């Protein structure tokens, strides 16, 4: 397998070469971040990470963790984005539930959807699909964590298979129902997001879930949940929501 130092050096040097100061300032303002921005978009960052992986023949577990720690420890936004892309690129077997502390550290220190959402849905979500029994108790704990980014991660870790017409809607339902009264926007949005994407394949399941809960749900949750429902059912749910206010 490859040399983690070489992978890290390549990513950092190549990102610096394609930096765009004008774009950097706009992205920094958009994300309201105190990090340093180079102005490199996600597609370009992803391409450079793939190049580094291919040229160095991948990374074993220890090399992956070393590179993650190096890039995430930087104060440069694109280095952190590269961390996410690197973890997405690694095969599921490269990580296990024993890496939970590392993943929790990333999620709890990310402090923005720009990192959390892909870490949760694509990285943790892939591990959950590959080893559901190992990760189920972890997600149960995350769903009641005091950090709302960790709670959001518990929800979004179930997103991808639900979006594809499968997944564990029962587990999502338990988590979402427990969080439905929360006032935190990023929790409300995540619940609505998962419901919206689930409804592309199973609209009646989503409609039957949200309709009796509209008095408890926030506007953003309800509006997202009903986007792909039958127009009549959508109108009925929205009317019930308005009446409950």
Image (cartoon, rainbow, N blue to C red):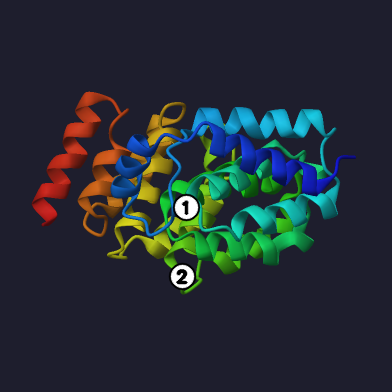
At label 2, counting other C-alpha atoms closer than 10 Å, the crowd grade (few under 14, some 14-19, many 20 or more) is few
Tell me if residue 160 comes above or below residue 145 in the rendering. Answer: above
Name the residue carrying label 1: 173
Q: Residue at x 76, y 49 (%)?
A: 131
Task: Identify the mark at residue 82; answer none if there is no mark.
Answer: none
Question: Could you give the CA–CA distance between mark 1 and mark 2, rounded to whole angstroms?
Answer: 20 Å
Residue 52: x and y, percent? 73, 33
Q: Residue at x 73, y 51 (%)?
A: 67
Question: Given the current orientation, which residue lies at the most extreme bottom position?
Answer: 146
Please identify, in this view, whether the residue under mark 1 or under mark 2 is nearer the observer: 2
Image-based side of 199 in relation to 210, left or right: right
Query: Does residue 158 show up?
Result: no
Q: Do callouts 1 and 2 mark residues in contact (Cβ within 8 Å)?
A: no
Name the residue carrying label 2: 147
**Disc 2 element:** loop
Residue 24: x and y, percent? 37, 41
Tell me if residue 58 comes above or below residue 68 in the rendering. Answer: above
Residue 10: x and y, percent? 70, 38
Write down the quadrant of residue 72 in the picture.
Answer: bottom right
Q: Nearer the viewer, residue 229 or 114?
A: 114
Image-based side of 6 in relation to 85, left or right: right
Picture quarter with the N terminus: top right
Picture quarter with the C terminus: bottom left
Q: Residue at x 80, y 47 (%)?
A: 4
**Disc 1 element:** helix
Q: Nearer the viewer, residue 103 or 184?
A: 103
Q: Residue at x 61, y 34 (%)?
A: 14
At label 1, counting other C-alpha atoms closer than 10 Å, the crowd grade (few under 14, some 14-19, many 20 or more) is some
Query: Does residue 197 show up?
Result: yes
Write down the quadrant of residue 38 in the picture.
Answer: top left
């Amino acid at each position: 397998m490859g040399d983690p130092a070489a992978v890290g050096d390549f990513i950092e040097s190549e990102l610096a070469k394609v930096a765009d100061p004008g774009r950097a300032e706009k992205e920094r303002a958009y994300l309201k971040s105190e990090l340093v921005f180079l102005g490199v978009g996600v597609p370009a960052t992803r391409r450079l990470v793939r190049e580094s992986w291919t040229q160095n023949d991948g990374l074993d577990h220890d090399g992956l963790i070393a590179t993650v720690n190096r890039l995430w420890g930087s104060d440069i936004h694109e280095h952190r984005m590269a961390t996410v892309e690197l973890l997405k690129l690694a095969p599921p077997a490269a990580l296990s539930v024993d890496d939970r502390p590392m993943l929790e550290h990333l999620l709890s220190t990310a402090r923005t959807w720009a990192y959390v959402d892909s870490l949760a849905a694509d990285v943790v979500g892939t591990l959950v699909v590959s080893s559901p029994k190992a990760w189920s108790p972890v997600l149960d704990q995350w769903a009641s964590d005091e950090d709302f980014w960790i709670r959001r991660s518990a929800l979004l870790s179930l997103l991808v298979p639900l979006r594809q017409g499968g997944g564990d809607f029962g587990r999502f339902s338990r988590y979402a129902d427990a969080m439905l009264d929360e006032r935190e926007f990023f929790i409300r949005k995540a619940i609505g997001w998962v419901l919206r994407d689930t409804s592309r394949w199973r609209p009646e399941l989503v409609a039957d879930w949200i309709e009796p809960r509209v008095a408890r749900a926030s506007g953003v949750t309800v509006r997202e949940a009903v986007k792909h429902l039958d127009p009549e059912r959508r109108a009925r749910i929205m009317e019930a929501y308005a009446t409950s206010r």
